[in-house]
Image: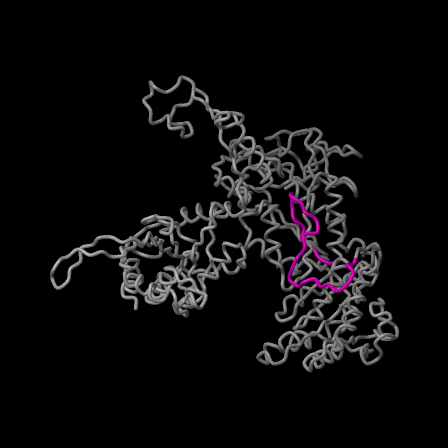
Amino acid sequence: MADKTLIEGIREALDEEMARDPRVFVVGTDVGPRGGVFLATQGLFAKYGPKRILDAPLAESSIIGIGIGAAMNGLRPVCEIQFADFIHPAYNQIANEAARMYYRTGGQYPVPMVIRAPYGGGVGGGLYHSQSIEATFAHVPGIKVVVPSTPADAKGLLKSAIRDGNPVLYLEPKKGYRMIKGEIPPGDYSVPIGVARVSRAGADLSIFAYGMMHYFALQAATDAAALGIDAEVVDLRSLSPLDTEAVLASVRKTGKALIVYEDNKFVGYGAEVAALISEEAFESLDAPILRVAGPDAPAAPYSHPLQEYFMVNPKTILAGIRKLAAY
Amino acid sequence: MSLDIMTTTVRMPKLGESVVEGKIGRWLKQVGDAVREFEPLLEVETDKVTTEVTATTAGTLLQLLHPEGAIVPVDTPIALIGSAGAEKSLAPAEAVARTIAVDQARSPLAARATGQSWVSPVVGRMAAEHGIDLSNVAGTGEGGRVTKKDILAFLKTRAVTVPAPTDELAAWEQPGTGELFRPSEEQPGTPVSAPPASNSTAGETIPLTAMRRAIAEHMVRSVSASPHVTTVFDVDLSRVVAHRQANKAAYARDGVNLTYTPYFVGAIAAGLKRHPAVNSSWANNAVRLHKPVNIGVAVSLGEDGLIVPVIRDADALNLLGLARAVNDLAERARRRQLKPDETQGGTFTLTNHGTSGSLFATPIINQPQCAILAAGKIEKRVLVVTHDGVDSVAIKTMCFMGLTFDHRMLDGASADAFMSTVKAVLEGWV
């Protein structure tokens, strides 16, 4: 089977779900004839027309508001936020309305909507096109947060997200859109939300990562193997709900945990994973829980050398692996 | 003697952009030497350069943390320098020990660097479990720390080397061979170690199945966690037998095989409702009382082991419902078709050991539950009964029922009160 890119997985999922279920529609900026800035919706406008591929004004709060209203009235909207950095104007709609509507209405109004948002840096995007926003939304109860790191998961997780009865924030590692390649199983399949995946089995230490950082972590683990360090890599895939059993099982096996995330370190998503391990697997720990994460700086720098310093990469992950292995 | 000794940690410097480690070339100062700030302390070699590393502060060199020739990662502590005056107030050896103690109190990182006192949670647990003196284990971790791997390696070599006792060992120091209980003059001159595996009398070693391992771990854990106490009641099942005889055929027409188990479960449920303290479990130094009455029934799977499917809300079922549940769970247990959650959430357990002829037994508690009831063999026995003040001999269908309970949560009197209810329900069955 020929390898496909991560963004092809996203496009296939959208196409197949729209063909399968007439309630599914897409709304976002430039998603129509242009096919989206990253071409995630390329060809869908021609196939499904302007009633199901809606070009929205440059107003994120409105894009999400449209989605919430449509979902409450029986449709299955897929809202695209062009860059995750721009999701903040819609925070109130997502956190106060979409995530809590089902609870607030005593179960009368579920909001089965998907919010797609390309996130992450390393693409020369500077402040407004590089942010990682997962910690902010994983903290909000009532909305699921998933991040694929392979083309197969990109398709399977998006299908699960569209079929889910409640809101799902589907974050896309945009640096990996075309860099990450792999097989996509033929036909209809879905990847369950809430289940992590051990992508590389190992005995010496466990690396927990997701999205682009999972891709880099696998590279670093390969480099570490050449140094005689047998690292296990766990792709979390679903940040909320988190597959706590998979995390704990891996740490109980290896005794060492390295958590990698691209977001700035302080109060980042990995802090929650570290807390979980410390609370539930303390007696299995053979070393302090380590995090490799971005610097606590206001934004990704635009200058390329500075951006390179800023981004977590296979080398910095390898340094973390070596430090933990030597401990 | 003042404890206010400032220590400064000297770390392996980063001698170039891509350099990650350095080799300790030669120590230019020794422990106890006074050093001035910027005075060369040691030579460090990398694959690119050899350079001198200087003291970052003035004081007394208190400890060299790595020998010459050691390769250590960048930023690893390599030496400790104490503030000026440290050598005056304390003898050198004492100064080192004292300084490290103070340093440890201030910074766990510095303590780890010494490699002596820092034991990770998993290493501490494994050492305790296997009775290992950590000072016997060679550490390969940072600063000589004993790692989990070191413990595993140590256990492996210990398993190989330990079992051969020498004749210098006294009999009572040898692993139990039974020789201890023979007069010393009858003991062989040279103690014999375990026969080699090739010996035809050595028997067979059977690897554990997952189920056997789970049972083994659970049983050991339960016995070590709970103080087990057993109380035994003799229960007259004559009315239950009569009821069963009268209703068996009718139940069979409904496709239900009426055994004694649903009667026991029904009586237990009534007992648990009346004595909620028994429907409980141990939860971190507290007793948790359970609202649902979920009764597990141990089902034997022959030589493979046993499994305990759970009848949920047993107090809400009548005899027919209980009989159905027992039939269904036992049948699917034997066919290995139980769903995982059907063996979880039990609040009490019944074991029917009497079916294999056992009169009474002292079972092990199914953790974290409070108690387990053991029903013995149901048999006719001759009993003295008193009717209107007149003693006579009668034939009754009897069963010994034992309750093993966790004495942390329950006392004898309350356990017996529960058993009295169970007995009364069974003896008065209508």
Residue B161, given in percent of the width and then of the height, sits at 53, 27
Indicate the position of residue B372 as horizontal and vertical percent values. Answer: 37, 55
Q: Quadrant of the C terminus of chain A?
A: top right
Residues drawn in magenta: A184-211
Residue B83 in sight from this viewpoint: no
Does A276 sit left or right of A17 as displayed? left
Q: Nearer the viewer, residue A256 or A40?
A: A40
Chief secondary structure of the magenta span?
loop
The answer to which image quadrant residue B284 occupies is: bottom left
The residue drawn where x is 75% and y is 69% is A116
**Is A19 left or right of B130, judged from the image as shown?**
right
A201, above or below B314, in the image: above
Q: B177 left or right of B429?
A: right
Res A46 seen here: yes
User: Does residue A123 lie above or below B197 as drawn?
Assistant: below
Judge by depth and name the residue closer to the eye, A318 or A71.
A71
Number of residue marks: 0
**A105 lies above or below B175:** below
